[in-house]
Image: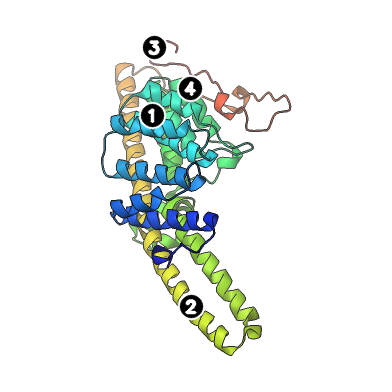
């Protein structure tokens, strides 16, 4: 409906939102000229214009344009004080991710650290995990492990981050902490045992609470679910309070909401199915990688036993225990220090780091 709406008679603020929606629909459909025409009519300096700029850049990334070409535009948008804070945040994240994909890890780390979350924001676990991988690529194993400790904070308990376990196991392995590496690898397999079993049995993915929660946490499925919930809520209100509208109007609105609910259900099913498959593949990939880490740990332990048959394999112990963690607060908001945690991780391969 919005895609074909004539906005000439609408108030400016409402018209801007509709034009943005129309331009996004055209952009998604590949009608770049139409999208440009819609975006060109957005008020200069408006939030809608900033979101349009971001959408165009993201579309160019998806179409395969080089990071070198797009980075300046994303950086300019991230630094534009006239753009809304959410737009600047998304642009800054795009800068960091493009730099990471270009293997410019030093600049990527600097960009990740420059991300400014809203005040009192509990934090974004995906952001911290990306920073951990960046530090790992730079050889900053201790700092990467510290970020993973951050991801163990209570506010991230339900975050779907299978890579967290993989990276922790890999760091332990690189530092020759073989038993902690094995334990970290097995932690993923234990944590998602039921979900992995259901995937292997080809059970309906939508019935797996872990995958469903991850799919609805962000992106297209989240938006489709929000639309579905809103239409359902308004339809229920119509059914409850529609008697006072008169029979003709009630019947008309009932038909309209019936059509809207059917379409919202269809879109939700399409989006959710696609995202669920992606999350399931993401979990399967991580599980396969940790199994490889577990296998490599076995090889390392067997090699040690073969080289020194008279020595005992070290007893199983955690590289980090409760007594090794210290929290010092001075009245600040509880998560202000999460990105500044530091740890010491011994290099058992022969030396300290």
Crowd band around label 3 with a 10 angstrom C-alpha radius: few (<14), some (14–19), many (20+): few
Mark 3 / mark 1, whichever is N-terminal? 1
Could you tell me which quadrant the N terminus lies in?
A: bottom left
Question: In whole angstroms, how far apart are the C-alphas of marks 4 and 3?
Answer: 19 Å
**x%, y% of residue 141?**
43, 22
Q: From the viewer's side, name the closer residue of 137 and 93.
A: 93
Question: In whole angstroms, how far apart are the C-alphas of marks 2 and 4?
Answer: 56 Å
- Tell which tag, 2 or 4, sits nearer the viewer: 2
Q: Verify CB contact (< 8 Å) between mark 2 and mark 4.
A: no
- Tell me how the rendering is colored: rainbow
Crowd band around label 1 with a 10 angstrom C-alpha radius: few (<14), some (14–19), many (20+): many
Write down the residue under mark 1: 170
Residue at disc 4, secondary structure = helix
59 to the left or right of 141: left
Crowd band around label 4 with a 10 angstrom C-alpha radius: few (<14), some (14–19), many (20+): many
Write down the residue under mark 4: 143
Q: Verify CB contact (< 8 Å) between mark 3 and mark 2.
A: no
Question: In whole angstroms, how far apart are the C-alphas of marks 2 and 1?
Answer: 55 Å
Write down the residue under mark 2: 256
Please name the residue shown 30% across and 17% down the image: 307
Question: In whole angstroms, how far apart are the C-alphas of marks 3 and 1?
Answer: 17 Å
């Amino acid at each position: 409906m919005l895609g074909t709406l004539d906005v000439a008679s609408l108030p400016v603020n409402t018209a801007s939102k509709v034009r943005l929606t129309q331009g996004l629909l055209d952009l998604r459909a590949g009608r770049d000229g139409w999208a440009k025409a819609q975006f060109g009519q957005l008020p200069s300096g408006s939030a809608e214009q900033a979101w349009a700029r971001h959408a165009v850049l993201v579309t160019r990334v998806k179409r395969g344009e080089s990071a070198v070409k797009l980075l300046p535009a994303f950086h300019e948008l991230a630094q534009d004080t006239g753009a809304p804070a959410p737009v600047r945040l998304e642009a800054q994240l795009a800068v960091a991710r493009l730099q990471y994909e270009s293997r410019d890890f030093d600049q990527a780390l600097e960009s990740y650290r420059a991300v400014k979350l809203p005040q009192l924001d509990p934090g974004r676990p995906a952001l911290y995990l990306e920073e951990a991988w960046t530090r790992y690529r730079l050889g900053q194993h201790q700092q990467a492990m510290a970020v993973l400790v951050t991801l163990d904070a209570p506010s991230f308990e339900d975050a779907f981050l299978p890579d967290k376990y993989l990276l922790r196991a890999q760091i332990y392995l690189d530092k020759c902490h073989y038993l902690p590496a094995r334990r970290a690898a097995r932690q993923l397999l234990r944590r998602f045992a039921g979900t992995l079993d259901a995937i292997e049995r080809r059970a309906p993915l939508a019935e797996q609470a872990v995958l469903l929660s991850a799919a609805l946490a962000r992106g297209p499925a989240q938006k489709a679910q929000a639309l579905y919930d809103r239409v359902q809520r308004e339809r229920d209100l119509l059914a409850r309070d529609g008697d006072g509208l008169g029979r003709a109007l009630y019947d008309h609105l009932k038909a309209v909401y019936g059509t809207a609910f059917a379409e919202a259900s269809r879109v939700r099913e399409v989006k959710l199915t696609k995202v669920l498959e992606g999350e399931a593949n993401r979990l399967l990939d991580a599980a396969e990688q940790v199994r490889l880490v577990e296998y490599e740990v076995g090889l390392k332990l067997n090699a040690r036993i073969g080289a020194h048959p008279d020595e005992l394999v070290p007893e199983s112990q955690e590289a980090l225990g409760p007594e090794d963690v210290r929290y010092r607060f001075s009245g600040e908001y509880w998560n202000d220090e999460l990105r500044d945690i530091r740890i010491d991780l011994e290099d058992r391969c022969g030396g300290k780091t």
